[in-house]
Image (cartoon, rainbow, N blue to C red):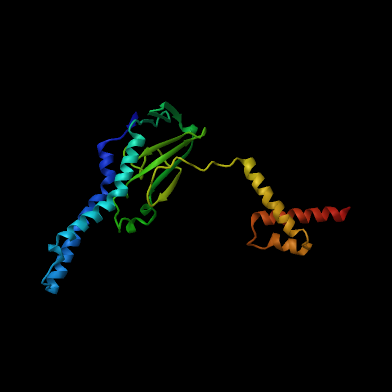
Amino acid sequence: MKEVLQINKRHQLKSISNGALVILGYPVGLLLLWLKELIWFKESSVLLELNFYFLLLGVCTVSFLPAFYLHIVYYLTNRYTVVEVDKQQQLITITDKKGKHVIHASDIKQVARVVQRDYRLPEKQQNWFPVPWRKYGYLKLVTHDNTVFLLTSLMLDPINPLIKETETQYKFLPDIDETFEEELTNAEIEDQLRVLVESFKLKFKDHTEQELVEKISKKGYRKEAVIAAEELLHENILNNKK
């Protein structure tokens, strides 16, 4: 059975829903301020001043600006996107303004989940300081041919996504970012390792055999340094045999 994902009212409301906590926080704050002034028996009350409410409205509006920004950007990103997920066939069909893309599970190189950094905290410590954009986030799906697809929280739940993530990235503001770090090939990894080993060999070239043995046997040395010491020791043994 195929499951279809696209922008809908439920996920749009869920994305902005944390803003309700922020809005509810203002009446609570006003109540506490009123009680404070009542207890102190002040003759003049800041609650009766019109400028106070203008300031309150300004603070509320500013606190929602990141959420409004993300909502607009996410909507523009996925307004033409329809995703069909067939778990039985292990197929993902993505239709967007560029066309129709049929992706097999084996074609996927990376699925990065990008969410607000509050989710990095233990569950009991989350949302202590609520921000309106907390529930915004997206999946960044990267195929082996380096094609990137972005699926935002306006069409799916990034915390419990239908498409399983391979890694999670935490950001204060989960803004859209299509870039990704390409995985190094085994050959590239070996080349980088060799460069570091040769660098350590230059540093160790005047070391005695005892000093080289210490670097091999003692803990705390980098892997590249140990390899360099082993190779130099082996070369010294071969030279002595000559």
Residue 45 picture quarter: bottom left
Q: Is residue 156 left or right of residue 26?
A: right
Residue lying farthest top? 99
Relative to 111, is 172 above or below?
below
Residue 221 picture quarter: bottom right
Q: Is residue 109 left or right of residue 235?
A: left
Relative to 155, is 115 above or below?
below
Q: Quadrant of the N terminus?
A: top left
Q: Is residue 87 left or right of residue 49?
A: right
> Residue visible at 47% across and 37% down?
142
- Would residue 13 be seen by someone viewing this image from the given angle? yes
> Residue visible at 69% across and 56% down?
226
Q: Position of residue 92 (x, y in %)?
A: 41, 30
Q: Position of residue 229 (x, y in %)?
A: 73, 57
Residue 68 picture quarter: top left
Residue lying farthest front? 51
- Would residue 156 be seen by someone viewing this image from the given angle? no
Q: Nearer the viewer, residue 124 or 97?
A: 97
Residue lying farthest bottom? 40
> Residue visible at 74% across and 61% down?
212
Q: Position of residue 132 (x, y in %)?
A: 28, 50
> Residue visible at 74% across and 59% down?
204
